[in-house]
Image: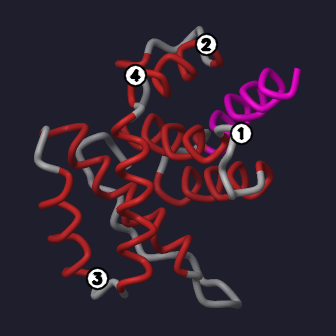
Amino acid sequence: MNDLEAPTAPPRNRQRPLGPQRRGRVLALQVLYEVDLTSHDWRESLQAHAEAVHASPQVIAFAEACLSGVLDDDLELDESIATHAPAWPLAQLAVVDRNVLRVALYELRAGSNVPPKVAINEAVELAKEFGGETSGRFVNGVLGSALEAREA
């Protein structure tokens, strides 16, 4: 996938259906991707994407909470990405990778009800599904470094 293609690929074949949190993360990622490239209003984008996929109220609520948190703290999240991926200037990261990291770092923050291993696993899966060939490993490495720093 290149940076001009929105993350809309169907989920890989799975044995169990995707839960509302996973669907909410995918929806949030789609909106963040659009907002990152176009500066569209995130609420309008969320509404349009949610309608397009017939998202349930629970999925929309999860995505909305995630989007609000990520966009409210975007400078802090981007600073964390820069700290834990110093060889990669933020502007040079693939749009998908950058936004997967933002969501995961938001979920890794102190006080989050998402267990760290879940946040990292979900991010790696999203990166593998929607990012480039090495996105999963890159995201895992950055988040592992962030988690180690948080626990130190």
Q: CA distance from mark 1 to mark 3?
A: 28 Å
Left or right: 144 in relation to 84: right
Real-space Cα separation, disc 4 to disc 3, in angstroms:
30 Å
Residue 95: quadrant of the picture? top left
Residue at mark 1 to residue at mark 4: CA–CA distance: 21 Å
Q: Give the prevailing secondary structure in the magenta stretch.
A: helix
Alpha carbon separation for disc pair 2 and 3: 35 Å
Q: Quadrant of residue 16?
A: bottom right
Q: Secondary structure at mark 3?
A: helix
Q: Amino acid at mark 2?
A: Thr
Q: Earlier in the sequence, mark 2 or mark 4?
A: 4
Q: Position of residue 27 (x, y in %)?
A: 37, 66
Task: Determine which residue is flagged by label 3.
Answer: 53
Cβ atoms under marks 2 and 4 closer than 8 Å: no
Residue situated in front as seen by the camera: 75 or 15 = 75
Does the residue at mark 4 contact the one at mark 3 (Cβ under 8 Å)? no
User: Which of disc 3 and disc 1 is earlier in sequence?
Assistant: 3
Tell me if residue 51 is in the magenta stretch. Answer: no
36 sits left or right of 12 in the view: left
Q: Amino acid at mark 3?
A: Val
SS category of the residue bearing label 4: helix
Between marks 2 and 4 in the image, the one whose residue lies nearer the viewer: 4
Q: Which mark is residue 83?
A: 2
Circle nearer the N terminus (2, 1): 2
Kindly identify the amino acid type of the residue bearing the numbered disc 1.
Answer: Asn
Q: Residues within 10 Å of mark 1 (few under 14, many from 20)?
A: some
The residue located at (54%, 38%) in the rendering is: 101
Q: Which mark is residue 140?
A: 1
- The residue at which mark 4 appears reads as 75
The residue lying at 42 percent from left, 42 percent from top is: 70
